Amino acid sequence: MRTDTEVRTSGLRALVEALGIVEAERFITLILREPFDYTQSQRQLWADRSVNELSKAAMAMRNASPHEGMEPTR
């Protein structure tokens, strides 16, 4: 299992890659400034899909690249 620092670093890299440095910093600022309920956010994000649909999509994604991201950490 990775350390908190490693997870934090990977998360920041992912944000920068997805959004760019300015938008990543903006995203972090928005999260820190506004109350955020992760559970409620997820309920709204997938409100139009059933648990069965989400499960099938997750399994398809997992089967498409079974070893990606599964490398052991040192």
Image (cartoon, rainbow, N blue to C red):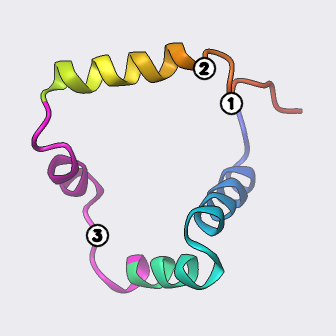
Horizontally, residue 44 falls left or right of residue 57, namely left
Tag 2 secondary structure = loop
Q: Earlier in the sequence, mark 1 or mark 3?
A: 3
Residue 2 vs residue 11, the one in the foreground:
11
Could you classify mark 3 by the number of other residues whose Cα lies within 10 Å: few (under 14), some (14-19), or many (20 or more)? few
Helix, strand or loop for disc 3: loop
Element at badge 1?
Answer: loop
Dot 1 crowding, Cα within 10 Å, few <14, some 14–19, many 20+: few
Three-letter code for the amino acid on which mark 3 is drawn? Phe
Q: Nearer the viewer, mark 2 or mark 1?
A: 2
Q: Residue at x 24, y 51 (%)?
A: 39
Residue drawn at x 65%, y 63% as measured from the top left: 17
Q: Which residue is mark 3?
A: 36
Magenta span includes 37: yes
Residues in magenta? 31-49
Asked whether the residues under the numbered discs 2 and 1 touch, taking CB atoms below 8 Å apart as contact, a structural biologist would say: yes
Which of the 4 image quadrants contains residue 41? bottom left
* Amino acid type for the residue under numbered disc 2: Ser
Task: List x then y, in percent, for residue 43.
Answer: 17, 47
Q: CA distance from mark 1 to mark 3?
A: 28 Å
Amino acid type at image mark 1: Gly
Numbered circle sitting on residue 65 = 2
Indicate left or right for 48 with 17 as reference. left
Count residues near mark 2 (Cα–Cα under 10 Å), then give few for <14, some for 14-19, many for 20+.
few
Q: CA distance from mark 2 to mark 3?
A: 32 Å
Q: Is residue 51 above or below residue 40?
A: above
Residue 45 vertical placement versus 71 (above, below): below
Q: Tell me the quarter of the picture where residue 16 sits.
A: bottom right
Residue holding disc 1:
69
Q: Is residue 44 left or right of residue 61?
A: left
Q: Estimate the x, y position of residue 70 in percent, counting from the top left.
A: 70, 24
